Amino acid sequence: MTGLYPDTRNIMNKSFHMSPDEFRKNAEAVVEWIARYQENVSKFPVLSQIEPGEVYAAFPEHPPQRGEPFEQVLRDLDEKVMPGITHWQSPNFYAYFPSNNSGPSILGDLLSSGIGVQGMLWATSPACTELETRVLDWLVEMLGLPSTFLSSGSGGGVIQDTASSATLCALLAARERATNFASNEVGCDGTLVAYTSCHAHSSLEKAVKIAGIGKKNLRLVDVDEAFAMRPEALERMVEADRRAGKKPFLVMATVGTTSSNALDPLGAIGGIARKHGLWFHVDSAMAGTAALCPELRWTQKGVEQADSYVFNPHKWMFTNFDCSVFYVADRKMLIETLSVLPEYLKNQATMAGAVFDYRDWHIPLGRRFRALKLWLLLRHYGVEGLQHHIRRHVELAQEFLQWVKADERFEVMAPAPLNLVCFRLKGSDEENQALMERLNQSGKIYLSHTKLNGKFTLRLCVGQAQTEREHVGAAWELIRSESGNRVIE
Ligand SMILES: Cc1ncc(COP(=O)(O)O)c(C=O)c1O
């Protein structure tokens, strides 16, 4: 020890970081791990078979004081983490809606982590903003969406984490449009009312709570026999609210509801929105991907009237979570709603108004380079490749639908326009629930349920990237055999 302070030079020169060489070696092991996982994913029980608390208990109570060898960590991943995984990437996964991925999107995400930019402003990495704008303009063309959503017009698109966040942003912009920005200044007065169908996703309910609209000011519009919103019921509710001194301000329609993939009539709902001055938001979270195929675009006829639109490439478009695409027809309204500009974020490009600063298009300030995974995906598959796989999924679901219809033990519970089939045993709810539990416990497939017309209903959604005919065929065989030799009374 010399002088007052200990000589720390040796320690200061030491680095705990992973060197580029170590990174190269470990990354090879991880890529190999993922490739092996992809090859073998169908061999795992689709639904994790562990009991609550098992993974938590598998790890020590205290954090590691000393760094550990990478191989040891990968071993623990295999032995302690993987048993607690439900395999969303299994071709035998049919539950909920898919959350699928693909080689190019995984690699795009890896590149995004590797480059490691934070693209809150154009200036903090121009490419992070401009590639996103370009890719989202491509998607407008690919999905046959209205040209108002293009960045070259009055609108534009942004990648958000989830459809829930995008819907919240739509609601906030609608709120400000309806109150001429007074609600941003002084808060809400309890008079604004939003509308959606009683089969819409719960994200709108969450949004009205967060945005200060209040749950009591969310109206759930009745649906028809196909579980689609009844436009005439919507209009009646809007008029009644007006008469009662309320201010109707937003309607959300769904293309592909979560329960049954019902398609709200966008044309009629958009017409009512326009007539009554409501913001028209369209939630196409899962089914929006179908519009890649021109012959399936009828599902979103009327979308040209939308003020905003969301769909999730992280559901059916082979892009790993999270990647939700949000479009608005009037970006000025969205930006004015969300923009705040503290001194420390001021910069020349922003002040000149010459660029998009995506921090003003969503709730967080920081944002990562998500466009890379979409860009790699689109360049790998091309439009043609994506169309091929989406068509295949729809064909497989339609084939499954025919099998169900042909077996008199089962009934189909909803129209199946795309890749989701809702069906049940002709029997009690208990029998159907027990059937689902047997199927899921077998580990061979995983499907989920809903209630339609008050009846417990099984949902089989074909959307996992690797699902092929052999898988859907085996799923049907399993469902049939687990349904035994039920005699129909
Ligand atoms: C129709 C619909 N909208 C919204 C969502 C919410 O999606 P996210 O998890 O991206 O918020 C879902 C989720 O399944 C959905 O099915």
Image (spheres, rainbow, N blue to C red):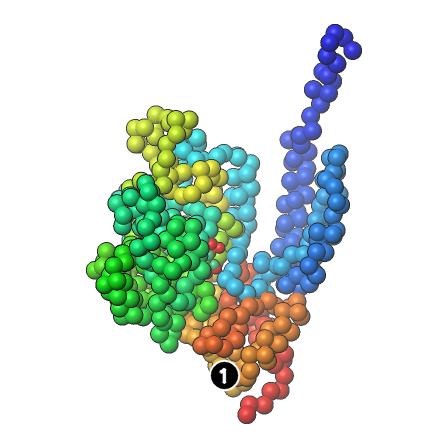
Vertical comparison of 128 with 6: above or below: below
Res 193 visible: yes
Residue at 65% x, 44% y is 30
Vertical comparison of 331 with 240: above or below: above
Quadrant that contains the C terminus: bottom right
For mark 1, give the secondary structure: helix
Q: Which residue is mark 1?
A: 406
Spot the residue most to the top.
Answer: 3
Q: What number of labels is visible?
A: 1
Quadrant that contains the N terminus: top right
Residue at 27% x, 50% y is 178
Spot the residue most to the right.
Answer: 1
Q: Nearer the viewer, residue 9 or 276?
A: 276
Residue type, numbered disc 1: Ala
Horizontal relation, residue 438 to residue 428: left or right: right
Horizontal relation, residue 256 to residue 14: left or right: left
